[in-house]
């Protein structure tokens, strides 16, 4: 549409406003999910010595011939090595993880040995060839490095601990100030008039941001009068990103651009070619990046997925990009998509082994319907001006539940509870 910014360009211009936040040092036990800011190097090799991979006896490979009798000269346990060396015709009782004593280069597993008494063992007629020795540094050498930036998984944390690191340097969590706006809003659980609704956007976006590594700061609702919004913007000082919710459309009570301009907002763009979410703006308020999201709940949440998640990545110093898209086919025909790219709420209804999943577009797409969004497991990206589209047509989808384990969720009952 003429005058409306395409979604990819809007994202690129938002990301251009952002840079990585500072760093902090955290304990290894607090590092999960954080973003490693500096390469981390191992302080010692793993294992730091040749280690037994099995329970048995450590001996010289040349002595382990079928029927040979060896003399047991000691024992090695995990955490307690045998102090001597293994010579010809000798063996050391050894357990998994214990250091292999000098002179030994093979483990005779206990199933291949017969204890004869008097400290002697006999090698089985057909012993396992082994060697069942983990070489020093076989996992990683001293000085091995984990690159940065990197969002730390539980497996990464285990590796860093094995590096013998008690602390690591990570990006601090970016502070994102969320400012809901509107006289019609009240907080959940507050007394309200018949004409007011519960503010939901800031709670959903706070959960989204926190899950992605940010530190959301929910501010009080800014009312539809300039002084209230000025106070909210002042309270957002110190945040790494300011996000307003609502108040940026074209009505007389939409104050974000006017009040923001008075406060020094340098507007980069306003309005984008997408549905839902057209009244989106971005710029800088002083030195702080600012994004204005639509007030409708679904519009705000969809824009959160498309723009705020990549913004948090940029603040964390990670490569920032649009959400991953996958190919899918329509399970049912749909009508024309309209003049703007449509991010339609949808569900995967079939996942064949030999082709893309089939998706069904929700019949109701009003941007106020949070129940439909909660039931959706993906957004179907429908091109502007397309359609009608037949069943089987190829579309792109953005998964909403990348951590799902495939568990079916019962749809939300939108009807009045029966008593």
Image (spheres, rainbow, N blue to C red):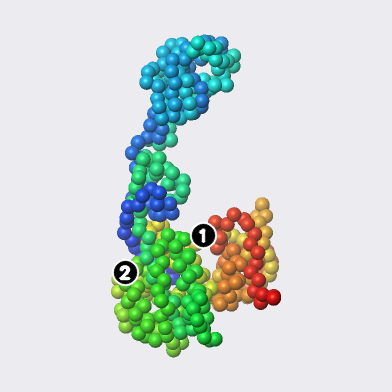
Q: Is residue 84 visible?
A: yes
Q: Is residue 141 left or right of residue 408?
A: left
Please tell me which residue is depicted at 64% across the width and 74% down the height of the picture: 414
Please tell me which residue is depicted at 35% across the width and 36% down the height of the picture: 44
Q: Is residue 249 left or right of residue 380?
A: left
> Which residue is denoted by mark 2 in the rendering?
238
Q: How many numbered discs?
A: 2
Quadrant of res 330: bottom right
SS at badge 1: loop
Q: Nearer the viewer, residue 315 or 67?
A: 67
9 vs 167: above or below: below
Q: How far is the residue under mark 2 from the one under mark 1?
A: 31 Å
SS at badge 2: loop
- The image's mark for residue 85 is none
Task: State the residue lying farthest toward the front.
Answer: 419
Q: Is residue 300 visible?
A: no
* Residue 138 drawn at (x, y percent): 43, 32
* Residue 58 drawn at (x, y percent): 46, 20
Q: Is residue 25 left or right of residue 338?
A: left
Please state, as top left, top right, bottom left or bottom right, where the C terminus lies in the image.
Answer: bottom right
318 vs 79: above or below: below
Q: Residues within 10 Å of mark 2 (few under 14, many from 20)?
A: few
Please tell me which residue is depicted at 38% across the width and 40% down the height of the picture: 163
> Which residue is denoted by mark 1 in the rendering?
324
Please tell me which residue is depicted at 40% across the width and 69% down the height of the picture: 217
Q: Residues within 10 Å of mark 1 (few under 14, many from 20)?
A: few
């Amino acid at each position: 549409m003429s005058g409306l910014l395409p979604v990819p360009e809007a994202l690129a211009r938002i990301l251009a406003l952002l840079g990585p936040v500072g760093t902090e040092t955290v304990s290894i036990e607090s590092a999960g999910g954080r973003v490693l800011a500096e390469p981390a190097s191992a302080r010692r090799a793993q294992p730091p010595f040749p280690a037994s991979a099995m329970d048995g006896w450590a001996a010289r490979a040349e002595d382990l011939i079928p029927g040979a009798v060896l003399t047991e000269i000691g024992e090695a346990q995990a955490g307690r090595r045998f102090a001597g060396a293994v010579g010809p015709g000798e063996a050391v009782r050894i357990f998994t993880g214990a250091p292999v004593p000098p002179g030994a280069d093979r483990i005779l597993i206990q199933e291949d040995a017969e204890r004869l008494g008097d400290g002697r063992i006999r090698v089985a007629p057909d012993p396992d060839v082994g060697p069942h020795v983990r070489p020093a540094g076989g996992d990683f050498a001293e000085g091995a490095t984990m690159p940065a930036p990197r969002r730390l998984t539980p497996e990464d944390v285990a590796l860093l601990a094995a590096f013998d690191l008690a602390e690591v340097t990570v990006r601090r969590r970016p502070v994102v100030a969320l400012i809901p706006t509107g006289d019609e809003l009240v907080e959940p659980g507050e007394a309200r008039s018949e004409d007011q609704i519960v503010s939901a956007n800031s709670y959903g976006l706070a959960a989204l941001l926190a899950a992605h590594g940010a530190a959301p700061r929910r501010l009080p609702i800014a009312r539809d009068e300039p002084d209230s919004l000025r106070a909210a913007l002042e309270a957002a000082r110190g945040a790494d990103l300011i996000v307003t919710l609502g108040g940026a459309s074209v009505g007389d009570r939409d104050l974000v651009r006017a009040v923001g301009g008075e406060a020094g907002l340098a507007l980069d763009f306003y309005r984008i070619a997408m549905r839902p979410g057209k009244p989106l703006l971005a710029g800088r308020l002083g030195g702080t990046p600012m994004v204005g999201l639509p007030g409708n709940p679904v519009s705000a949440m969809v824009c959160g997925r498309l723009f705020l998640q990549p913004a948090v990545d940029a603040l964390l110093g990670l490569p920032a990009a649009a959400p991953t898209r996958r190919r899918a086919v329509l399970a049912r025909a749909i009508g024309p998509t309209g003049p703007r790219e449509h991010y339609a709420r949808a569900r995967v209804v079939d996942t064949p082994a030999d082709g893309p999943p089939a998706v069904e577009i929700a019949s109701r797409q009003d941007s106020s319907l949070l129940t439909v969004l909660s039931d959706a497991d993906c957004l179907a990206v429908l091109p502007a001006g397309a359609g009608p589209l037949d069943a089987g047509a190829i579309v792109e989808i953005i998964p909403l539940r990348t951590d799902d384990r495939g568990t079916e969720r019962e749809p939300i009952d939108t009807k009045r509870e029966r008593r």
